[in-house]
Amino acid sequence: MFATPIQNRYDAIVVGARCAGAATAMLLARQGAKVLLIDRGAHGTDTMSTHALMRAAVMQLSHWGLIGKVVASGAQPVTTTSFLYEGEEPIDIAIKPGHGTSALYAPRRYALDAILSDAAVEAGVDLHYGAQLVDLLRGPHGGVTGAVLRDRTGSTHEVAAGIVIGADGRHSTVAKLTGAATIKRAHHASMCVYAYADGLPNRGFRWFWAEGAAGGIIPTNEGHSCVFLSLPRTETRTFRTALSREGFRDALSTKMPGLAAETAEAAMATRPVGFPGEPGYLRRACGDGWALVGDAGYFKDPLTAHGISDALRDAQVLADAIVMGCTDHYAATRDAISGDMLTISDRIGSFEWTLDELMALHDKLNRTMKANHAWIAENLHAMAIAA
Ligand SMILES: Cc1cc2nc3c(=O)[nH]c(=O)nc-3n(C[C@H](O)[C@H](O)[C@H](O)COP(=O)(O)OP(=O)(O)OC[C@H]3O[C@@H](n4cnc5c(N)ncnc54)[C@H](O)[C@@H]3O)c2cc1C
C-alpha cells in the first residue's frame, strides 16, 4: 500500500528523490508531464556529501526559483574561495557576481534534497518514499514500458510509464536492469573522511593541498563547517584510524597540519564519516524507454566537488530533451559536456601529482567550469525564451 493511491500509468517514473531525481521530476512536471517520483529512503534525510555547490548549481537553483529556500534553510553564504597549497602563500579568490549569483552555498542534503522534492510535489509530482524499484516492465521489442515497485509492506505494483528514469545513485538498479554500458571509466579513487565542526568563522570555501593529501573547510547549515580530509586509496590505515574523533584529529595533524591548526579550537559536533572511494564512470545515458541522471549515469571523484552541480545541470538537459521527445539529445549533450570534468577529477583524485602539476590541473578545472557556466547560461537563456 502506498500512503496515497498511485495511478496505473505516468509519463515518467523517476527512481531516486535526491538532487538528480527530484530536480528532473520537478522540471518535467513544470512542463506538464505526469510524474511519479519514488525513493526507498525518507524525506529530509542526509546522505554522504561535503555539500559544496559550485556556481553552476547556484545558477540552476536561482533559475528554478529555489535559491531563496536554500538561503532560508540556514546554509551560510560563501563569498570567497581559498586555495592553500602547502608551503605557498594562500590564494584568496572573491566570488565575482556573475550569471545571476554573488555567493555560493553548501546546504546539507537533508535541506537541499527536501527543497527539491517539495518543489516537485508543488509542481504536481506524485512522490512516495519507502518505495523501491525492483524490476522493469518490457514491451514486445524489449523497450522499457514501466516499473515494478515494492511498497513498505512488501507488496509489488506494476506501473506503466513513457520513460523510467534512474536517478538512483552509484549502485543504480535501473542501470543494472537495463545493462547500461560504461562508455568511459576513470582509474583512480580518493578516500574521504569528514566531520562537522562547530564554531569556525565563515571564511568561505577553504581548499588545502599537500602532496599525498587534500582537505577543506566548507561552511554549511546550523553554523557548522564540514571539515574533510582526502587521501590516496593506498592510505587505508590512516583512513580507518581517522573514523574516530581522536583519529581524525591525528590524521589532520599528520597529513594536513595547516588544516589541523585552523580547526584545532573547534569542537567536532559529529563523529567522522568515511567514503572509501570509487573510480568514476560515464554510463550510457539512455535507451528505449529509460534514462539515467546524476550519479546513476555519471560519477566522478568527489575531490572536485561537482557531483551535485552536474546532476542539477543534467536534470535540466534530460527534462528538456524528454519534453522535446528527443532523449538522444540528452545523451549527446551530457557526454560532450562531462568528459573533461571526469578526466580532471580522476587526475586530481589519483594524487599522482606534484603541487606544480596540481596547480596546472586546477587551471584546467577552472577553464572547464567557466565553459560549463557559459553553456548553462546560454541554455537557461534559450529555455527562458522557449517558456
Ligand atoms: C564523500 C563525498 C563527498 C561529496 N562531496 C560533494 C560536494 O562537496 N559537492 C558536490 O557537488 N558533490 C559531492 N559529492 C557527490 C554528490 O554527493 C553526488 O554526486 C550526489 O549525491 C548525486 O546525487 P543523485 O541524486 O544522483 O544520487 P544520490 O544522492 O545517491 O541519491 C540516490 C537516491 O536513490 C534512492 N534509490 C536507490 N536505489 C533505489 C531503488 N531501487 N528504488 C528507490 N529508490 C532508490 C536512494 O535511496 C537515494 O535517495 C560527494 C560524494 C561523496 C561520496
Image (cartoon, rainbow, N blue to C red):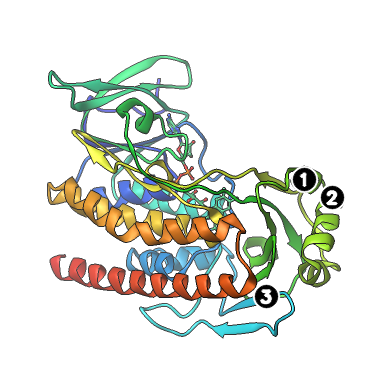
Q: Quadrant of the N terminus?
A: top left
Quickly name the residue at label 3: 85
Q: Secondary structure at mark 2?
A: helix
Q: Secondary structure at mark 3?
A: strand
Task: Using the rendered image of the protein, determine whether residue 205 is visible from the camera's viewpoint.
Answer: no
Give amino acid for label 1: Leu
Query: Could you tell me residue 285's position as x and y percent?
Result: 29, 43
Marks 2 & 1, CB-CB < 8 Å contact: yes
Give the image quarter of residue 78.
bottom right
Q: Is residue 193 above or below residue 107?
A: above
Query: Could you tell me residue 303's position as x and y percent?
Result: 57, 58
Q: Which mark is residue 224?
A: none
Question: Could you classify mark 1 by the number of other residues whose Cα lies within 10 Å: few (under 14), some (14-19), or many (20 or more)?
Answer: some
Give amino acid for label 3: Tyr
Marks 3 & 1, CB-CB < 8 Å contact: no
> Does mark 2 have its CB less than 8 Å from ligand 1?
no
Q: Nearer the viewer, mark 3 or mark 2?
A: 3
Give the side of residue 40 with respect to residue 182, left or right: right
Q: Which mark is residue 247?
A: 2
As measured in the structure, the alpha-carbon distance from the residue carrying label 3 to the one carrying label 2 is: 23 Å
Residue at point 28%, 58% (across, down): 336
Q: Is residue 314 above or below residue 287?
A: below
Which label's residue is closer to the chain start, 3 or 2? Answer: 3
Quickly name the residue at label 1: 243
Query: Could you tell me residue 95's position as x and y percent?
Result: 51, 81
